[in-house]
Amino acid sequence: MSEQHGPYHRQGEPGGQGCAVGVLPISLRAPDGSLIAAWLLDAGTEASELELLRTVAARLGVCWGHDDLGWWAAVPAPQ
């Protein structure tokens, strides 16, 4: 059975409205079985996944821009 996909169109621009996020500290298991500290982020039912992703990107310090080749994102290097 053949499935057709696309054409894909990205609508809007990076940035934009974020949302309130609840944060719960959790532990995850790495592939080697060790525990990794992490955060579970919950935007509730009032926000979309796009608003949650915008909020996470903003908190990570992502800077958006565009030029003749399209949109780009700059992310601060870990220190």
Image: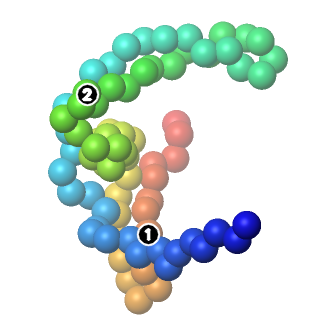
The percent coordinates of residue 19 (x first, y second) are 20, 38
Q: From what the image shows, is residue 41 above or below residue 14?
A: above
Please tell me in which quadrant of the rendered image residue 15 appears: bottom left
Residue at image point 42% right, 21% down: 40
Q: Looking at the image, how many numbered discs can be counted on the residues? A: 2
Q: Amino acid at mark 2?
A: Gly
The percent coordinates of residue 31 (x first, y second) are 77, 22
Residue that numbered label 1 is attached to: 72
Mark 2 falls on what kind of element? loop
Residue at image point 41% right, 75% down: 9
Residue that numbered label 2 is attached to: 44
Q: From what the image shows, is residue 1 above or below residue 49?
A: below
Mark 1 falls on what kind of element? strand
The residue mark sitting in front, 1 or 2, is: 2
The percent coordinates of residue 70 (x first, y second) are 43, 80
| Quadrant of the image containing the N terminus | bottom right
